[in-house]
Image (cartoon, rainbow, N blue to C red):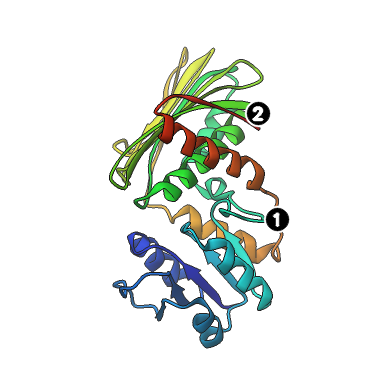
Amino acid sequence: MTIALSAHPALNPLVGQLADALPIKGLYYPARRNPNTDLPFYSDLSAMLQATSPRVCAFLSPYADLHNDVHTCLQSGVDILCAGPVPKADQPIASGGIHRGSPLFTKALQQRRNSSFAEPVYLRLVVGAQEPGLLPAWWAVCRQLAFASDLLGETPSQVHLCANRHGRAYQVVLTATAPSGASIQLVVAPQPALAELTLLGRGGVISASAAQSGIALASAKGTHVVPDAATPPAELAWLRDFLEKENEQSEHSGDDGQALLSGLRRALRTRQPVLVNF
């Protein structure tokens, strides 16, 4: 099964890793310049589809005309994988779920289920947007909210958003309360290398960061560290899972994603915290 990718040039290192492991035949992005990549690059989606005849096209980056390109793929009989919700989508499209392939998520969930950890009280996630611009910051917020919801096993019905920007660099803070009463704080910053997790439970604390060598659970029984190692990107597991399950997808983030995007724009316009209901 051949695969085509759509990704911003900032994701070239990720694209290279995916191309080394999967039958990726072409790379598309609506940009004027040719990114530094060994893959055949196309600035026209129809040209790439005609040249590579992919079975699936995976969109790893958001942009204003993404909904039109998704429609083009579907009309051409090409299956779609989308790393986040589609702006201006006129129908729900299965998207997201990449965090489930993340070693950080897997380890944190394993530790969170440790009996000594008990019930979650407070979760804080800090992540850097992988690309400049509003839409990549939005995708990062959606991804972190999905991460938090799956880690806690519950989803808040509303969130508060604060946001500001400097040029194409965006900072977003989301706060919420889960149905159980656990507090959630998600931070998106423009530094791509950022990745931090703190989860406080009644019996311990789970923590991890890009600067650490593993994820730690500190409790009354002491501190247990799960060592980290060089791991493949979460996108690789996400793509493989899609192919192995014959295009089965279970996550739809369309409605919630659009509500978050609308709230993010209001927060930037008013420079005030805004409430977003799901």
Please provide percent x and percent y for residue 274. Answer: 51, 26
Residue shown at 53%/30% (left/top)?
111
Helix, strand or loop for disc 2: loop
Which of the pair 166/61 is nearer the observer?
166
Disc sitting over residue 154 in the figure = 2
In the image, what residue type sits under mark 1? Answer: Gln
Please provide percent x and percent y for residue 119. Answer: 60, 17
Residue shown at 55%/33% (left/top)?
148
* Residue bearing mark 1: 91
Using residue 32 as the reference point, say whether residue 186 is left or right of it.
Answer: right
Q: Quadrant of the C terminus?
A: top right
In the image, what residue type sits under mark 2? Answer: Glu
Please provide percent x and percent y for residue 115. Answer: 60, 21
Q: Residues within 10 Å of mark 1 (few under 14, many from 20)?
A: few
Using residue 189 as the reference point, say whether residue 178 is left or right of it.
Answer: right
Helix, strand or loop for disc 1: loop
Image: 50 above or below 182: below
Q: Point out the tag, 2 or 1, that comes first from the N-terminus.
A: 1
